[in-house]
Amino acid sequence: MSKSERKTVFREDLCTRCGICFNKCPVLELPIEEAKKEIIRLIEGKQSKYVLSKCTTCFSCNLFCPENANPYQLILERWNDLYYKRGVPPLYTFVCPTREDNIWQLLNVFLSTQEKKWILRWMNNTPKPEDVVLLIGNYTHLFPFIIGGSKILDYFAPVDLIDQWEGGAYLYQGGYLDLVQRIAYRTKQDFDKWDTKNIVAALDAVEYIFQEAHPNHMNVEHKQSFSSLQEWLLDNIKSGELKIENPLNMTITVHDNCYSKVFEGKYWNIARDIIKKCGCEMIEMRHNKENSLCCGFGAGASWVKNISIPFDIIHEGIKKFREAEETGADALVSYCGGCIYLLWATKELMGSKIDLFHIIEVLRMAMGEKLDYPKVHIERAWDIIAIITYVWLISLVRKRFFIKKITYDQNKSTFRPKNFYLLKFIRSAFKSSLIKKIFRKMFLVLTKLLNTREKVIPL
């Protein structure tokens, strides 16, 4: 699909070039005069000095724009232009389910028997027209125990289609707009084939993509009704369908993910209401809601060098944990499955002591359901760290590429893992507490040496 077939979302006619978007940005914080110059450079398609290499794609600029010009979408368009010049870094095979070696393929080496049963059931589920579909999604797939076995699933037909790419949500966030448009058409075919009316998304980002980005940016209309799992959970707590049997009496601080800033921030209060109804007290971080910091994923979207991507991501994640720890809260809670796997990797690498939960886990505990916490999370975090390390190592000898296939080959599925001896060796090494300690120190040293995320201009 060509760029001309997409709708224009950035409103150049409304933009006054005031620079407030990049001046108030919690990551860039550019001086106002430099911010004005940067927005002009982006509009005119000239070389960006800061935004395209520093932005963590968190949507805040849209909220700060006094004219509702949507500067965020201008950034995405410029990244889309860059894609055709340079492709994607070799490390991006990590998040491409149609290429080897991706995280879903590699994780099969470590999944438990129970996890494989859940995932196979979700991946092979064909919804009936009367079903309410729950899109499990790419990233809940990495931690299926977050929701697997819960009473919550009794109300849905859970479906786990990895090559729907979360509707293109994480590609959209990285500016791969033409790819997202192809995915939008593909997912429309999937949904229309099911003939279902109601679809609930485990990720808020996915609701936004299908309900807002596809029709208003990609020119693809879906006939289904979309909502988020959070909305469903809160409604059913209020109605008494989901009963709070075990109020938790914890202090919680919340990570507001990037996509929480869409729809005028409706997800902020929904998450906080669920947490409060579970018997928890809220303590806010310094950066929250409209100026919340990214979990780290966005640092990969604005990549400069392939070699630095994991270190840039963890560098941003460390900022989040430091703010969470400053609150004195018992736990940090994320309501985004896309954030949770990176946050757990960061937590283990920096040795943070604050507990970390997905909001579904908080509700499940309050409902009286038993979790194997934190054992399964710690094990999975090191599975993820091993996979990141493995893919990073092999990416050093690979070239940039263009994402051509958006549907994986069923006959050569990425879910049929090879032996991956190097990956297994790395993961086996992490079973040693001494190796873990050495790796943590080495990783943090390399983060200081290789990261490209330091503040760009002192105020």
Image (tube, grey):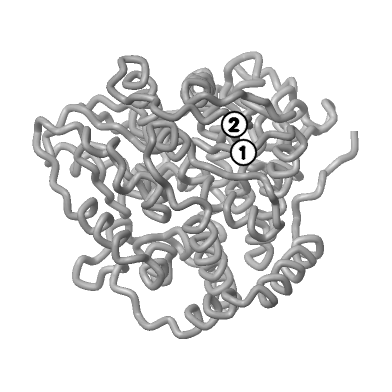
Quadrant of residue 78 in the image? top right
Query: What kind of residue is marked 2?
Result: Met
Q: Quadrant of the C terminus?
A: top right
Residue at (19%, 71%) from the top-left corner?
411
Residue 317 to residue 443: above or below: above
In depth, the one of 377 and 414 nearer the eye is 377
**Would you say 266 lies left or right of 370 here?**
right
Q: CA distance from mark 1 to mark 2?
A: 8 Å
Secondary structure, mark 1, is strand
Return the x and y of residue 122 as percentages of the image width and height.
Answer: 23, 51
> Which of the pair 113/418 is nearer the observer?
113
Up-down: is 94 above or below 286? below
Judge from the rendering whether residue 287 lies leftward or rightward of residue 130; answer left or right: right
Q: Is residue 421 above or below residue 328?
A: below
C-beta proximity under 8 Å, tags 1 and 2:
yes
Q: Which residue is mark 2?
A: 250
